[in-house]
Image: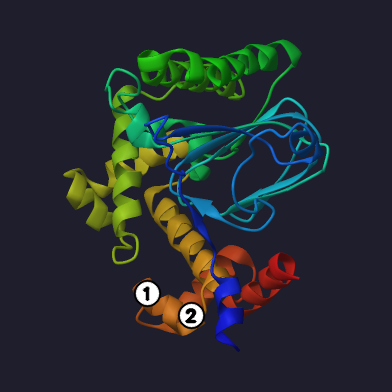
Amino acid sequence: MKSGENKKKIIPVHHLPEDRSQGFDFKLYHLKGEYAYNKKLTSMPGETSVPHRHKFYEVCFFTKGGGVHEIDFQSYEIKERSIHFISPGQVHRIAGKAENQGFVLAFTGSFLLENDQYLPVGLNSLDFFNPVQGNQILQLDIEEYRRILQLVEGIEVDQHEMGDYARDIVRSYIMIILNKCKHYYSLLRLDDSQPEGSVLKLVEKFKNKVDQHFRTMHQVQEYSQLLNITPGHLNRCCKKLTGLNASELVLHRIVLEAKRLLIFTEKTSKEVAFELSFEDPSYFSRIFKKKTGFSPTSFRNRMRDKYHH
């Protein structure tokens, strides 16, 4: 395979473009489509219809249109009045229709967390930014969506008109939007039970540790030692909050990374196994097939045919 062809297989990573006039890590774009093009509205840079990922958080507000939005190999239908949430590092692409309208809100975690009063438990505690905890799509009724959209439109105006106060004002807008989405998302729960704050914080710490160490640490006991708790307690807390035990969460993260490496790098299945600290590549292949239904090679071929042809 030629080197030029290899580069096409490697997934691009998008960064927020620098804007000296704005001076902080936040952008508001219009969704790509005929409407934005004809109106000469600023839309997201880069080709969003091919797989890519970001170094920042992204919230997509769809006001009109359709198509499919794929987030980490899960397909979600694009519907009017839907809000889609993407976390840093997630692979996604928007195969939307030409008539799509709406906004893309992009921001870094550090921008929001400059002041601890905004999100004391962190962005990862929000269900819609956590792929392990389920759905990353929020579908609202007309009035709910209207209230959210008013806030987004407020950002579009005030980011340019509030001068030195724009930074704090925009941050407040984003926090109100996220907290409103958190409220609407909580209404989707099948029961009224809410996790205790201590459980929420513990599981958040665990997931952060998994993100840092999943390539070399696969055992629940290793993580429980880092957190100074028993494996049983960690499992109970994870099960209560996510419906999955701790080992399932670790494996979910490992398999997700394996998928990304198989599709968007030229590493062999054996090299992927070694990178993820599997001494026996055949054992890695068995685990991968058990979780996905495909061997690593079959998965790579199927998904590359989908994305690159």
The three-letter code of the residue at mark 2 reads: Lys
Q: Quadrant of the N terminus?
A: bottom right
Residue 268 is situated, as x and y percent measured from the top left of the image, at 50, 83
* SS for dot 2: loop
Asked if the residues shown at circle 2 and circle 1 are in contact, with their CB atoms under 8 angstroms apart, the answer is yes
Q: Is residue 51 left or right of residue 250?
A: right
- Whole-percent x, y for residue 305 in the image: 73, 72
Closer to the chain start, of discs 2 and 1, is: 2
Residue found at the very far bottom of the displayed protein: 1
Residue 192: in sight, yes or no? no
Q: Residue at x 36, y 27 (%)?
A: 112
Measure the C-alpha gap from mark 2 to mark 1: 9 Å
Q: Is residue 80 left or right of residue 287?
A: right
Q: Which mark is residue 275?
A: 1
Q: Which residue is mark 2?
A: 267
Asked if residue 291 can be seen in this view, the reply is yes
Secondary element under disc 1, as helix, strand or loop, is helix
Q: Position of residue 244 (x, y in %)?
A: 47, 45
Rendered residue at 33%/52% (across/down): 210
Q: Is residue 257 above or below residue 166?
A: below
In which quadrant will I find the C terminus? Answer: bottom right
The tag on residue 126 is: none
Using the rendered view, name the quadrant where residue 297 is placed.
Answer: bottom right
Residue at point 62%, 74% (across, down): 300
- Nearer the observer, disc 2 or disc 1? 2
Number of numbered markers? 2
Q: Quadrant of residue 40?
A: top right
In the current view of this chain or complex, which residue is farthest to the front?
Answer: 21
* Dot 2 alpha-carbon crowd within 10 angstroms: few under 14, some 14 to 19, many 20 or more: few
Q: Amino acid type of disc 1?
A: Glu
Residue 49, position as x, y percentages in the image:
69, 53
